[in-house]
Image: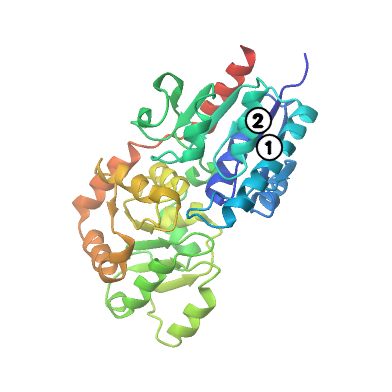
Amino acid sequence: MDKRKFIISGGGTGGHIFPAISIANALKEKDPSCEILFVGAEGRMEMERVPAAGYPIVGLPIMGLPRKPSFKLLVFLRKWTQSKRKARRVIKKFSPDAVIGVGGYASGPILKTASKMGIPTVIQEQNSYAGITNRLLARKAVRICVAYDKMDRYFPADKIVYTGNPVRKDLTLPHDPIDAKNFFKLKADKPVILILGGSLGARTLNQSILAGLKKISNEDVEIIWQTGKIYHKSILEEIGNNKPVNLHIMEFVSRMDMAFAAADLVISRAGAGTISELCLVGKPSILVPSPNVAEDHQTKNAMALVEKGAALMIRDDEAVEKLIDATFALIADKAKMENLSREILNLAKPDASNQIANIILEIVKK
């Protein structure tokens, strides 16, 4: 029997790259002989992250669709045409049995070209609000794997499979919370608040913490604050000698499994991958959606949880004023914390990668 071959496409952010790698790993586990080629966008994060995970990748000269009419639209159209030509060459040379798109710039031209060439395509939509690229690609897709209910608002109902989003397996490793607190040199008898702004950081979250330093120093809690790479140095300079002893400032949290095990409450943006991780670990959360994303999908992700009583949300433009007070009010309300934990855990889909891999393999068999 010939080796099965798959192209997996997408990227631009870690939120797209990790699920793509997770799906690839699941396919490899189920069919060790299969060949997998990634297709990403030139100059984007996936061009480094994917090879580091052990998979080959080809870059397309694609860019995001400009949000406002300008000369950039002409540049986009030129790059789109170039990308479709290159996608066709890649598909003809690699000859995949199926093409999987996880979102991001590159998935558009490669999935559209694959569909035209009669190759089955699968879409993995991570957000509660489907982006325009996936909505257009859905017409020709064989299956659409989603992480939220009510997605038939955007996609044909007969193609939808509710799989959840792939998440990192190491997050579910059992860790004693005391060991996890010791790992971060935290006091074992204090509640722990984990503040995550992503690897680059979230300006609003950081501004909210800086505005609340005095309140933080008066609270009987421990706080792990991930500032992100962009803001770390300037934050340390701004705080100087005024750092509260219960505030632990980190540029990046490399051991998220330990961080989640230590945390009683998580403050975070509302990217699809982050939300799926919070569901998996069952942590009470306050979400501050980023307003700087396409079609405001983070707010829609957060609201999907809020409507189920599975998280709280504070708008980005209100966070500096409200976030610190809301955080300390919630950490003191044990009944509310337990309820949020229970409801978010109900939304977890821990087997998403395997389920998506099974769907892909079933399509290829047919």
Task: Tell me how far mark 2 sits from mark 1, CA to CA.
Answer: 7 Å
**Colour convention of the picture:** rainbow
* Residue lying at 37% horizontally and 27% vertically, measured from the top left: 152
In screen coordinates, is 201 left or right of 113? Answer: left
Residue 111 in view: yes
Q: Say which amino acid is labelled 2.
A: Thr
- Check disc 1 and report the residue beneath it: 84
Amino acid found under the numbered disc labelled 1: Lys
The answer to which of 93 and 81 lies nearer the viewer is 81
Q: Dividing the picture into quarters, in which one does residue 72 lie?
A: bottom right
Residue 199: x and y in percent read: 53, 61
Q: Is residue 92 left or right of residue 178?
A: right
| Left or right of 364 in this view: 265 | left
User: Which numbered circle lies on residue 113?
Assistant: 2
| Badge 1: residue crowd in 10 Å (few <14, some 14–19, many ≥20) | many
Helix, strand or loop for disc 1: helix
Please state which of residues 62 and 287 is positioned toward the viewer in this rendering.
62
Dot 2 falls on a residue whose secondary structure is helix
Question: Compared to 173, does 182 lie above or below?
Answer: below
Residue name at image x 28 percent, y 58 percent: 314
Quarter of the image with the N terminus is top right
Q: Nearer the viewer, residue 181 or 251?
A: 251
Give how far across and how far down residue 70 sits, in percent: 54, 57
Position in image of residue 210 (x %, y %): 37, 77
Looking at the rendered structure, which numbered label has been put on residue 97? none
Residue contact at pointers 2 and 1, CB within 8 angstroms:
yes
